[in-house]
């Protein structure tokens, strides 16, 4: 067993811990691991180039930027904030938990691409959440504002991740089924997807609880201020 | 027929536009960065096609460009451009346009949803409008175009304003936009270099004999740890399964494969919430939301991840051996 390629992992850990620019760190780690595994430098270059262009789909979110940018230029975030201010019953916790429910439900139906950090969080959810937080604490500090935004993004991630595994035709379930099929164990996708349900429910409960605790923390800070 | 390849061309064009605007502003490293990336996007299909017929030279060239991007990245300071309109002008515009502003923003998820649901039934002149692979993502790209036109109409602004504002946002995100792709490439290199098998061998070596609970715990924590390293539970799953799950948990201790597979994967997902290596979920949103701490999103979700892991692990332990 050749353990030397693990040094690539060490490069990553040190690079991220010391907060170097992540891009060169990642490329260095790839070169270190590949060379220590005995790959020919030219093959390693080709592997790096090929796998990079194969995952181009991950940059798809930039196509949302012109539309979002234009709307923000015309006051989308300001309007979302104003509107939230007028909706009396809609608290921060209700807004985020409602979003979590919709996001997780859509992911369970296999519709993961319809929402996301660029599509829904930056233009809609984050400004609305900030406005809801301002109803609690009119002079939100920059740190609090960042935390509200971060909780909105976290809610989006958690809804997506733990809903998606319940859907039978998505990556995770098919990967599990494919792995077992290769090793002579036949399972239906449904029998695998079913067991993701307890975690999906738990994830909804836990994140909702944390959102509610976050709101309570903001209320306390507002009282203390 | 609309295919995902056209979407890459579109992204490439937007990246080249950003490069050109930066060149005009004399931001040379930034212009070179987006130029290289734009060329990689536009030329990516050529690289893959040549690779398929056995020509490695374009892929090697692409690899060199990736290294050049890495050398340029430290020169891109993440300074956002000044706002192009004042806050008061935006507020006045918001009051004037009201709920109309929501329409284009909601068109992005809505059009994507409609194409995801009904896209395969759309035909033009007898041929399908959308190619099946990655139809939802092609739909998302189309939805972004629809939303851009709708936004220009609502705000009575030219499309050029949209492009300029889009470029401003892309520059604000900066090199963080590149991380998801690079980490995916790193995952591939790690797999080919045998990092996975080395970790599985190590975790097998520390495994206590004859204790099903400890074995399950090492499996679950291994899924988390390996996902944290690789940034992706999909890469961790086959490795941990082949190392511990299949030979020990299933074949020796009689674990239920469906439960072990499903819940084991979900343990990995908890790891995804914790790691900067999952840049598209954790670092890019932080940059998009202009958080001052790049790890802000990870911090916000860390305790949720721990809670979800504990619940999943205990449920798995209670169910998997029956």
Image: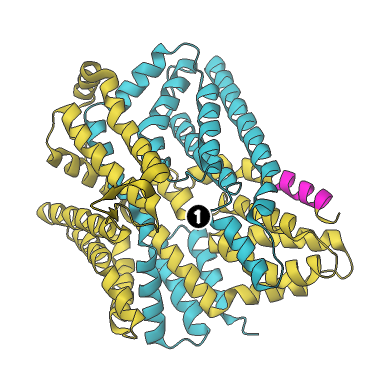
Chain colours: A cyan, B yellow
Say which residue appears at 31% left-offset and 26% top-offset.
Answer: B102
Say which residue appears at 89% left-offset and 68% top-offset.
Answer: B210
Residue holding disc 1: B276
Q: Quadrant of the C terminus of chain B?
A: bottom right
Q: Which SS does the magenta portion mostly show?
A: helix
Query: Mark 1 packing: few (<14 Cα in 10 Å), some, or many (20+)?
Result: many
Q: Residue furthest front?
A: B126
Q: Is residue A91 magenta?
A: no
Total label count? 1
Residue B204 in the image: state x and y as whole percent.
75, 73
Residue A117 in the image: state x and y as whole percent.
41, 42
Q: Quadrant of the N terminus of chain B?
A: bottom left
Residue A224 seen in the current view:
yes
Residue B89 in the image: state x and y as whole percent.
18, 23
Say which residue appears at 22% left-offset and 39% top-offset.
Answer: B148
Q: Quadrant of residue A199?
A: top right
Q: Nearer the viewer, residue A17 or A66?
A: A66
Q: Which residues are magenta?
A: B309-319
Side of B273 relative to A50 (left or right): right
Q: Residue furthest left?
A: B24
Residue B226 seen in the current view:
no
Q: Is residue B288 above or below residue A128?
A: below
Q: Is residue A13 above or below residue B50?
A: above
Q: Is residue B203 above or below residue B19?
A: below
Task: Please state the chain letter of the residue tagged with numbered disc 1 in the rendered image.
Answer: B
Say which residue appears at 67% left-offset and 43% top-offset.
Answer: A197
What SS does tag 1 mark? loop
Q: Residue furthest right?
A: B210
């Amino acid at each position: 067993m050749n353990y030397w390629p693990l040094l690539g992992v060490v490069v990553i850990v040190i690079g991220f811990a010391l907060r170097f620019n992540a891009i060169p760190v990642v490329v260095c780690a790839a070169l270190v691991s590949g060379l220590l595994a005995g790959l020919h430098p030219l093959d390693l270059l080709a592997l790096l180039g090929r796998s990079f262009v194969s995952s181009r789909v991950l940059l798809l979110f930039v196509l949302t930027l012109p539309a979002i940018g234009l709307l923000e230029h015309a006051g989308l975030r300001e309007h979302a904030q104003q509107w939230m201010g007028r909706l009396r019953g809609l608290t921060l916790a209700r807004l985020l938990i409602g979003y979590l429910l919709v996001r997780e439900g859509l992911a369970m139906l296999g519709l993961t691409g319809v929402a996301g950090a660029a599509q829904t969080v930056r233009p809609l959810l984050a400004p609305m959440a900030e406005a809801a937080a301002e109803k609690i604490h009119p002079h939100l500090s920059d740190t609090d504002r960042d935390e509200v935004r971060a909780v909105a993004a976290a809610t989006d991630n958690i809804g997506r991740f733990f809903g998606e595994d319940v859907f039978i035709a998505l990556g995770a379930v098919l990967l599990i089924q494919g792995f077992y099929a290769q090793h002579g164990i036949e399972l239906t996708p449904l029998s695998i997807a079913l067991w993701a349900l307890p975690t999906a429910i738990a994830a909804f409960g836990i994140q909702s609880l944390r959102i509610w605790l976050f709101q309570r923390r903001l209320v306390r800070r507002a009282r203390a201020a | 027929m609309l295919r995902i390849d056209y979407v890459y061309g579109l992204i490439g064009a937007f990246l080249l536009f950003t490069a050109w605007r930066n060149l005009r502003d004399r931001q040379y490293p930034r212009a070179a960065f987006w130029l290289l990336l734009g060329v990689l996007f536009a030329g990516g299909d050529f690289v893959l096609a040549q690779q398929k017929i056995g020509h490695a030279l374009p892929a090697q060239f692409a690899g060199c460009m990736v290294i050049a991007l890495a050398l340029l990245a430290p020169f891109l300071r993440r300074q956002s451009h000044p706002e192009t309109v004042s806050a008061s002008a935006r507020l006045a515009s918001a009051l004037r346009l009201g709920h109309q502003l929501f329409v284009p923003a909601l068109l992005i998820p809505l059009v994507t949803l409609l194409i995801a649901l009904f896209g395969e039934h759309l035909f033009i002149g007898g041929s399908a409008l959308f190619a099946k692979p990655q139809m939802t993502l092609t739909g998302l790209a189309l939805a972004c175009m629809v939303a851009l036109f709708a936004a220009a109409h609502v705000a009575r602004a030219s499309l050029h304003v949209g492009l300029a504002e889009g470029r401003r946002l892309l520059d604000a995100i900066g090199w963080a936009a590149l991380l998801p792709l690079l980490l995916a490439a790193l995952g591939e290199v790690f797999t080919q270099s045998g990092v996975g098998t080395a970790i599985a061998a190590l975790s097998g070596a520390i495994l206590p004999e004859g204790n099903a609970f400890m074995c399950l715990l090492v499996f679950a924590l291994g899924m988390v740890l390996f996902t944290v390293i690789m940034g992706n539970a999909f890469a961790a799953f086959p490795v941990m399964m082949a190392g511990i799950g299949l030979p020990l948990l299933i074949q020796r201790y009689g674990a239920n494969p469906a439960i072990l597979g499903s819940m084991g994967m979900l343990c990995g997902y908890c790891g995804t919430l914790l790691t900067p290596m999952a840049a598209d979920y954790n670092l890019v949103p932080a940059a998009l939301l202009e958080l001052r701490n790049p790890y802000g999103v990870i911090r916000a979700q860390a305790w949720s991840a721990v809670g979800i892991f504990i619940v999943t692990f205990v449920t798995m332990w209670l169910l998997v051996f029956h």
